[in-house]
Amino acid sequence: MRARNLIIGAALTAVFIALAVMSFFWTPYDIATLDIPGRLKTPGAAHLLGTDHFGRDILSMIMMGARTSIAVALVAVGIGMALGIPLGLLAAARHGSLLDEIIMRGNDLIFAFPSLVIAILITAVFGASAVNAIIAIGIFNVPVFARLTRSAALPLWERDFILAARVCGKSAARISVEHILPNIANLMIVQGTIQFSLGILAEAALSYIGLGAQPPTASWGRMLADAQTLVSIAPHVALIPGFAILLMVLGLNLLGDGLRDWLDPRLRVARV
Amino acid sequence: MIRYTLGRLTSLTVSLIVASLVIFAVIEVIPGDPAAFMLGVNARPDTIAALRAEMGLDQPLFQRYFAWVAGMLQGDFGTSWTYKTPVADLISARIWVSLPLAAYALILSTAIAFPAGIYAASRRGGAGDITIMGATQLGVAIPNFWFAMILVLIFAVNLRWFSAGGFPGWGNPALALKSLTLPAIALALPQAAILARVMRSSLLDMLGEDFIRTARAKGLTRRQALWRHAVRNALIPVLTILGLQFSFLLAGGIIIEQVFFLPGLGRLIFQSISARDLIVVESVVMLLVFLVIVVNFAVDLAYAAVDPRLRRR
């Protein structure tokens, strides 16, 4: 049962990553060419997933969209980890200090802004683009990793092997990097997978409302926005991008669950 | 309890002040000249000057900030540049779509999640548990705006039970509720999935506790022990999640309002962004953040009232 989650999750994720990578070299059709007479074709031999309202091949669009989704979500998770983990380590190392307090209250504050509201603020001033979507999703990831790092690092600081390292004269910074970090890495990988899937959903939502990637960049959320008015005439145009998002997110969530159980059985009860 | 409340109240105030500073900085300081930004590159200098005067941009920054905050405290959110009406009027017309939608979704989410979570926990490992947990995996992974489109396709386009969008106003409450039903379902589904998982795991934790064994030893049936002791205690973590969900529902509503063309705060924000009406964006964002912070504050207090152990933290 547990290994099944890992395998299904890894397989689904691998398929989408493969599609995204493949799109750099080859797509069935060029999505920049419009074919108005061949528009809204249902899935068939020539177009495996049909065509959209401009006659563009939906499979090719899905492949290009996978690239956008994965890139945005991955970089956003990277931002969250790159800023959040050091902040969390710092807060744990200086537990109870004013610095700890400031970092944690700052996190609470970011949590008080729903991520979508952050995105709206950013796009209102800087304009809509994939880069701004990355920043908006990334900012929201920072407190997630900072909190998790701090809460995982705090009990480690009480352990004997850390005491031994301190006795050896290692600085708090060195202990954080050499002893704390390796012990919480598994947890970060699992959380990274979960945030990755949330990032995919957030990117889709932002580009659906026009605040994410702008044309001609293909994105699943945009495809859904374009398909919305066609839902009664050509349901497949609206259904396929949604299934792509659903399967990708489902795959990442299963992968995260599976990885957690595989990497550390003690964490099984930790997440719901 | 009084000390705890005062402590929470202080942090509430600090959060609100910092949030307002951040929003003010992003909207009024980063663009350089907000008036020129709002009017675009082709604006005539005298128009920009007029807007600058109206926004009070000739005054020092801190004075503008205090004027903005003082205004909001008195219910004056400024005057929209595009609508030429007070922002407070724009908000009060739309908040009665956004808040009922979030509340409706919260009720639906709870109504689905509680029975599902309790059933799954009581049948742990059984077919019912596996089915419900599988369904929650799907529920968490479905983008809610896509789910909304599918609901429209099935219930509005094919079955014609509901309209595909729009809002008739509260003149006819039954009709108004009906038009919020599909949006509320779309909004509630992912939250219900999360809530059902929290409910299940919290209940499973409780079922492993000694007091449940004691209750069983006293002669209570499994069912009685579950309902009288476990469910009640399992509700505490669930309440926290419920508070957090309110902010997701408010923010999520922004997108769902777009799908169903509902005239709520979300649509107001988008229309203001495309019109570059920063005065409206600034105040509506502040209002949303205010609502979220205050709800979380209320949840913290309710939580401490229920569980005295928390007051000491």
Image (cartoon, rainbow, N blue to C red):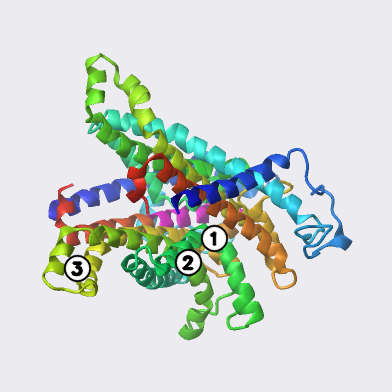
Q: Which residues are magenta?
A: B274-290
Residue at 74% x, 53% y: name it. A59
Residue placed most toward the observer, A33 or B82? A33
Say which label, 2 or 1, has the lower sequence index.
Answer: 1
Task: Check if residue B279 falls in the magenta segment.
Answer: yes
Relative to A222, residue A132 above or below: above
Q: Do labels 2 and 1 touch, CB within 8 Å?
A: yes
- Does the image show residue B132? yes
The chain identifier of the residue carrying mark 1 reads B
Circles 2 and 1 on the same chain: yes
Residue placed most toward the observer, B136 or B107? B136
Task: Check if residue A96 falls in the magenta segment.
Answer: no
User: Looking at the picture, how far across and down is residue B163, in whole percent?
Assistant: 60, 79
Q: Which residue is mark 3?
A: B229
Element type at mark 3: helix
Relative to B93, residue A160 above or below: above
User: Looking at the picture, how far across and down is residue A67, in whole percent?
Assistant: 66, 43
Q: Which mark is residue B142?
A: 1
Element type at mark 1: loop
Q: Which mark is residue A20?
A: none
Q: Which residue is mark 2?
A: B189
The Cα–Cα distance between marks 3 and 1, rounded to whole angstroms, is 34 Å
Q: Is residue B205 left or right of residue A257?
A: left
- Does the image show residue A129? no
Q: Residue furthest right?
A: A37
Identify the amino acid type marked 3.
Answer: His
The Cα–Cα distance between marks 2 and 3, rounded to whole angstroms, is 28 Å
Q: Residue furthest top?
A: A169
Residue placed most toward the observer, B53 or A12? A12
Identify the amino acid type marked 1.
Answer: Ile
